[in-house]
Structures are given as structure tokens and as C-alpha cells.
Amino acid sequence: MNINLASLEYLRNQNIHFCVPLTSGQISVPFFQSFIEWVKTADQLQIKWKIDTETDTDQTNNILIEKFLTNLESTHLMFINPNLAWEPHHILQLLSSEKHIIGGIINNTVDRSPDMRKENEILEVSTVNSKFLMISKEAIGHLSNHHNVNPLDNARPYFKTFFDNAEIDGVFYNEEQLLCKYWKDMGGKAWIHSDVKIMDK
């Protein structure tokens, strides 16, 4: 991936908060190897980041979002499944897109209709897979005000139902579908980067 000076300045002004749900209770060797390469790349390019993990429960993603919002310096949340192998440039491609909700293509699966927008290698989609998903803090802030995003604990202001399952007008939505629906309710769009292709083995 070639990075021009303007793009590099933008990247250096961001702060990525990696959020890893430990679905199997541990991080895989491919993920660990991928992260080592990320650390080298981030250090070379002077890109700021931090990482949090959370043991798998029915509220794991919402707990990770709470941690992200609590960290005032973070600008983008990056969900990554701990079983995935990925490349540092995948993260840079998502971040460089400057889209509020954008992910990669997992197992060659894309959820979009022909009438959706395309901006070069960036495609509008109906749903983004949360196994490799970047969300801006600005988007989370707007989603926090959606009428169906509710507090899970009144003593924890950032712990809300961003990820949830629900039936609306006879249609069942899983967590990822519902998050994207709420974002679209507020005028947003969900995207994938067609060059970010990852296999979940």
C-alpha cells in the first residue's frame, strides 16, 4: 500500500483502539503473528493505537465499545476476531477510507444490492461483518442517541445496546444487521473495502 504525505498526516492524527472479543478464550497464533507485524508497521509510520480484549459473553461487543468510549484519545474502534490472520495494510486501508463504519470481506461474502454506491474499491453494503470492522467514535456517538440504543446499566453511561438482536416489523435482525440498520436510520451508510479480503478458517 502506497501512502502519500497527506494520507500519512491523517493516519498519524488518528488513534486506533483494537477490540478483540475472546470467543474461544484465547488469541490464535495467526492473529498474534499478524499483530506483531502491525506493531512494527505502526511504529514505523508513527500511528497511535491500543488494544483491549474481553472474554466472550452475550455483551462482549458492548463492553468493548464501553472501553473504547472511556478512552478519550481513541478515534476509531477496530473489532478483530482473534482467529483471523490479517495484514497491517488492511487496517491502514480501512482507516484511510475515512468512512464511519467500514469492514473487510470475510470468506468472500458481501451483503449488498446492485443499486448501492461504489467509490472505487469501497462498496456500500447492507451489513458489515463484525469480525473485521472499524467504527469511528463519531459514529458511536450518533448511535448512542438512537431511540433503540438503551442503557444496560445506569451506573455505566457508555454501556449500551449498540449490539443487540431484535425483531422489527416482523423482520429478525442479528447484532451486525441491527447496528447497520440503526446507523442507516440516522442517515449513515455502511461500507466494505474490496481489497481487504480475509478468510476465516
Image: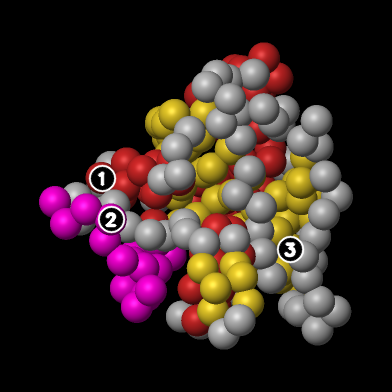
Asked whether the viewer can see residue 87, the reply is no
The range drawn in magenta is 138-155
Instruction: Indicate whether 189 appears above or below 31.
Output: below
Report which residue position mark 1 lands on. 70
Quarter that holds the N terminus:
top right
Of the two numbered discs 1 and 3 on the same chain, state the one appearing first in sequence: 1
The reply to whether the C-beta atoms of the residues labelled 1 and 3 are less than 8 Å apart is no
Report which residue position mark 3 lands on. 122
Report which residue position mark 2 lands on. 152
Q: Is residue 179 left or right of residue 28?
A: left
Asked which secondary structure carries label 3, the reply is strand
Residue at 42% from the left image edge and 60% from the top image edge: 162
Quarter that holds the C terminus:
top right
Residue at the farthest front position: 170
Residue at 70% from the left image edge and 19% from the top image edge: 30
- Residue type at numbered disc 2: Leu
Residue 2 image-quadrant placement:
top right
